[in-house]
Amino acid sequence: MTTICDLDPTIVTALHSAVGEAVVTTSLDQLRYYLDSWPDEDTVVLGPSIDLNAALRLAETMRVLRPSLGVILVRQRIDTGVLGEAIRAGVREVVDERDLSGLNAAVRRSHTLAAALREQQTPAGAAPRATAAPRGKVITVFSAKGGCGKTTLATNMAAALADRGRREVCLVDLDLAFGDVAIALQLFPAHTIADAVPLSENLDFTALQALLTPHSPGLTTLVAPVEPGSAESIPASLIGHIIELLREQFDYVVVDTPPAFDDQVLTAFDLSDVVCLLATLDIPALKNLKLTLETMELLNYPRDRWRIVLNRADSKVGLAISEVEKTLRTTIAVQIPSSRDVPAAINRGVPIVLDDPKHPVSLAIRNFSERSVVGPTAPQSLDSMLAGGARPDRRGLRRWRSRT
């Protein structure tokens, strides 16, 4: 398969006509996301509107991390300077924008070379390496202030994403000291996440699966320890390993968190495709949300992964939504209304999206889940944009984060 990356739809159409079947990405961030989700992609075409220096940095990185991946650079003007820089960066070929037949030939050569390189990496007598399955998405729900409704949002999002068995979803309770997922869903688990500690060095999905507690069609849970003191024995490295194992098997992994920036939460952030930052319409919650946004900026978490969720948004407390957005300097992705039906559903142990699918709260959470989690975070193919088709949706993103 080939992936095209360019900002201009007209250029994309021309490149696609030369390349044939391809996936289209419209930014380098989206391209990196796709490449991490599809490790067997073998050819990337970087169009002329992609900044040259950024394209060369990508090629340098891929030359080390993905030697079989061919990066083909398309330029409006090719001179010896561009060619020299491209060769040093590990670009496989440089093609003139007008030479569509040359681009087609370059892509075919890249496919052939990639197949040969993969064959060389396969041990003699071993079966050819199977195509890696796309990984699931990780969605983390967080608020630095307790009482905002993190567990309510996490449980209902997980139930909405599962869609009564249409997708496979795992809900992880990462509030290791005071997790409420089991209580909110009225589960009686035989095992908790603490039982993974003795297996940490040899933990695989078969062992992890024995610790999961099913809830409803498509929805499985990994609940928090019963004893609060168990939290200290669960290292962040184990949390990361668990999330990676789960995302290989589930379409979506929803992570509920404590109100703290501890190592376990930061590990979840590192592996998250979407981070839902939750607040309510009161000054302490909004202050903590603003501090959270500033902290995430300092830690270099990309803004396009954040989703600001305002819970109980219709509360009449003298704060206007527009003023809140102005103060936070960001838009609110969804406003969830307040309702006494929500705690009533919690007391019955049934997420309100399942208990009353047409309730305003259910509709807000379901629409948010489909729009902000299922839909736009995955790159679409050109065929999808033009004809409404779609490649499989089960994809994930690994975070690149540099701390200074």
Image (spheres, rainbow, N blue to C red):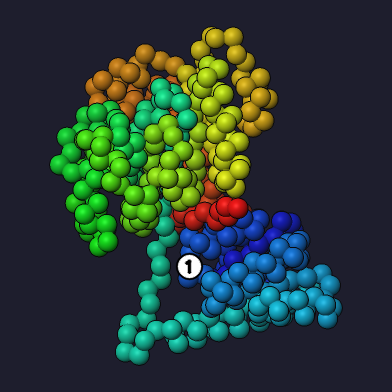
Q: Is residue 172 visible?
A: yes
Q: Which residue is mark 1?
A: 39
User: How many numbered circles are shown?
Assistant: 1
The x, y position of residue 261, in whole percent, is 46, 38
Residue 321 or residue 369, whichever sits in front? 321
Decide: few, some or many residues near mark 1? Use Cα within 10 Å; few <14, some 14-19, many ≥20: some
| Residue lying at 73% horizontally and 71% vertically, measured from the top left | 74
Q: Amino acid at mark 1?
A: Pro
The x, y position of residue 31, in whole percent, is 60, 60
Q: Is residue 358 above or below residue 25?
A: above
Q: Which quarter of the figure has residue 216?
A: top left
Q: Is residue 305 above or below residue 31?
A: above
Residue 59 or residue 116, whichever sits in front? 59
Residue 185 or residue 228, whichever sits in front? 228
The x, y position of residue 173, in whole percent, is 32, 39
| Residue lying at 26% horizontally and 20% vertically, measured from the top left | 347
**Is residue 346 rendered to the left or right of residue 7?**
left
Residue 261 or residue 37, whichever sits in front? 261
Most extreme residue toward the left is 190
Give the SS element for disc 1.
Answer: loop
Q: Is residue 171 visible?
A: no
| Residue lying at 51% horizontally and 12% vertically, measured from the top left | 315
| Residue lying at 53% horizontally and 16% vertically, measured from the top left | 282
**Is residue 321 rendered to the left or right of residue 75?**
left
Q: Is residue 162 above or below residue 6?
A: above
**Is residue 65 rendered to the left or right of residue 126?**
right
Q: Which quarter of the figure has residue 224?
A: top left
The x, y position of residue 223, in whole percent, is 26, 39
